[in-house]
């Protein structure tokens, strides 16, 4: 099964009707909820932390339900010391990335992900990762 990482911005956009990517985010969430896909959805504990902090700050009425969806429908990968060291090297090499984005891009390459679903165009600078902004159903 192929792995695909879904960036925190997708989860955030799907929770805010006033977000310019709301409809795309909702479509991606519906795709994630479907069964028997050819992709394993992967997020990191850092993506989970970004998303939960976001919805907590927005006091989203379905925040716990959304976190449950995340935890039950995705594979959660945790940062460790070795990955931290490699991410710091990557972070120092690519100035356009913050730590979490550097971690996400690096993990895409380490896992051999075909795609990264994200609305963040900064990922386009990293040629080893193909960023898409919709489910990979072409």
Image: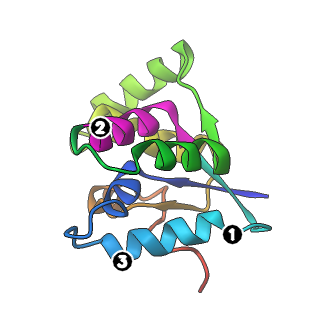
Can you say whether 73 is above or below 106 in the image?
A: below
Q: Position of residue 136 (x, y in %)?
A: 58, 75
- Name the element at disc 1: loop
Picture mark count: 3
Residue depicted at x 34% and y 50%:
61
- Taking depth in this image into account, of 29 and 61 the one nearest to the observer is 61
Query: Is label 1 in contact with label 2 (beta carbons under 8 Å)?
Result: no
Is the C terminus in the top left, top right, bottom left or bottom right quadrant?
A: bottom right
Find the distance from the CA under tag 2 to the CA under tag 3.
21 Å
Residue depicted at x 30% and y 49%:
60
| Mark toward the start of the polypeptide (1 vs 2) | 1
Residue farthest along the top direction in this orientation = 81
Q: Residues within 10 Å of mark 2 (few under 14, many from 20)?
A: few
Can you say whether 103 is above or below 72 in the image?
A: above
**For the residues carrying marks 1 and 2, which lies nearer the camera in this image?**
2
- Taking depth in this image into account, of 54 and 136 the one nearest to the observer is 54
Is the N terminus in the top left, top right, bottom left or bottom right quadrant?
A: bottom right
Q: Position of residue 74 (x, y in %)?
A: 64, 48
33 displayed left or right of 65: right
Q: Which residue is mark 1?
A: 34
| Magenta extent | 43-56
Residue 56's mark?
Answer: 2
Can you say whether 19 is above or below 90 in the image?
A: below
Find the distance from the CA under tag 1 to the CA under tag 2.
26 Å
What secondary structure prevails in the magenta region? helix
Is 116 within the magenta? no
- Name the element at disc 2: helix
Q: Which residue is mark 3?
A: 23
- Taking depth in this image into account, of 37 and 89 the one nearest to the observer is 37
Is 49 within the magenta? yes
61 displayed left or right of 132: left
Q: Is residue 122 something one can see in this rendering?
A: yes
């Amino acid at each position: 099964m192929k792995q695909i990482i879904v960036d925190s911005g997708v989860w955030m956009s799907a929770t805010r009707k006033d977000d310019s990517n709301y409809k795309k985010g909702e479509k991606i969430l519906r795709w994630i909820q479907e069964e028997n896909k050819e992709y394993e959805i992967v997020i990191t504990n850092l993506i989970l932390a970004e998303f939960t902090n976001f919805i907590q700050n927005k006091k989203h009425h379905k925040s716990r339900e959304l976190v449950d969806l995340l935890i039950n429908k995705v594979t959660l990968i945790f940062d460790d010391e070795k990955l931290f060291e490699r991410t710091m090297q990557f972070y120092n090499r690519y100035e356009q990335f913050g730590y979490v984005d550097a971690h996400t891009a690096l993990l895409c390459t380490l896992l051999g992900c075909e795609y990264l679903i994200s609305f963040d165009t900064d990922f386009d600078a990293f040629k080893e990762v193909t960023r898409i902004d919709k489910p990979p159903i072409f």
